[in-house]
Image (cartoon, rainbow, N blue to C red):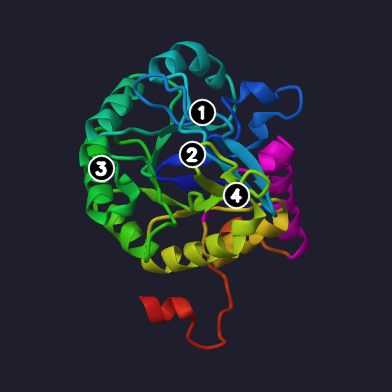
Amino acid sequence: MTTTSFSLAGLHLKNRVLVASGTYGYGNDVLDIADPAGLGGIVTKSLSLKPRDGNPPPRIVETASGMLNSIGLANIGVRRFIDEKLPFLRTVDTALIANIAASTVDEYCDVMKLLEGEEGVDGYEINVSCPNVRDGGLNFGTSCAMTASITKRLRAITKKPLIIKLTPNVTHISEFARAVEAEGADAVSVINTLIGMAIDVRTRKPVLATVTGGLSGPAIKPVALAKVYETARAVKIPVMGIGGIMTATDALEFLIAGASAVQIGTANFVNPAAGITIARGIEQYCDEHGIPDVADLVGSLNATTGVSVIDSWL
């Protein structure tokens, strides 16, 4: 039998497949279709200090091999999450990672402090792709110094696993990964969505109310793979690969490129059981190829064809 489990900063994950924030609700919406206990972990929908209505519609549009979204971090707020959603999530036999979003550094800290006192929250993923209202709306995640500062502040609050979800909308994602590693992050999630847009040629207007949104799905997989490869070569902490993973083969590519685990996002809208199927597919691949531990796949890329473009960037 292949060993599928691994430890993330002391947190036991039964397998290396999690569901990405914002794509799985709070876990109880899919019970008629899939058993969340078959996952390595659930990453919650982003939680802010106060409830958020999000952006006006239309805020989701299908694109070629992908999806654009501009949800605007709509959520019920951390206090309602604790009262209404966390009791169910405590009953699910899998790890629970709370994703936190905020518009100020203090708000990140306040949300985490509220969650710290609650049983059942196993770790945190920090969404830094949020506008900093105290700095003219510049996204936290596009400033290396600000991303590092957030990590340092949050590291002082918790001893639980701290994962920073990095945006790909920067020149060198490896610089950001090194910065958060230096400030105590236990892992990084790579990547968040790419900036994209769609236009209705009949009206000559943008399809999304906010003009641009986040592109996810198979269309971004090659970019995500390259970013995971770049990041894994730059840091010693684990990398969670995200971006266009629809099948076990996709997930295996990310593991081979250097990801220690993967998160399934857009695929959940097609099939809420996709993550469970992918986890089984990884295990089957290892069994068929005589690989005793999924860990043996991580970073096993045989890149012997010369210097890559990424090498020239570093």
Label tally: 4
Please identify, in this view, whether the residue under mark 3 or under mark 1 is nearer the observer.
1
Residue 207 is situated, as x and y percent measured from the top left of the image, at 60, 42
Element assignment for label 4: loop
Q: Main secondary structure of the magenta part?
A: helix
Residue 5 is situated, as x and y percent measured from the top left of the image, at 57, 46
Q: CA distance from mark 2 to mark 3?
A: 27 Å
Quarter holding residue 274: top right
Q: Which residue is mark 3?
A: 150
Q: CA distance from mark 3 to mark 1?
A: 29 Å
Q: Residue 56 got which mark?
A: 1
Q: Earlier in the sequence, mark 3 or mark 1?
A: 1
Element assignment for label 3: helix
Q: Nearer the viewer, residue 259 or 268?
A: 268
Q: Residue 164 got which mark?
A: none
User: Mark 1 is on which residue type?
Assistant: Pro
Q: CA distance from mark 2 to mark 4?
A: 11 Å
**Span of residues in magenta:** 260-289
Please identify, in this view, whether the residue under mark 4 or under mark 3 is nearer the observer.
4
Q: Which residue is mark 2?
A: 210
Residue in the picture at 24% in, 33% down? 157
Q: Are marks 3 and 1 in contact (CB under 8 Å)?
A: no
Classed neighbour count for the residue bearing mark 4: other residues with Cα under 10 Å, few (<14), some (14–19), many (≥20): some
Q: CA distance from mark 4 to mark 1?
A: 16 Å
Q: Earlier in the sequence, mark 4 or mark 3?
A: 3
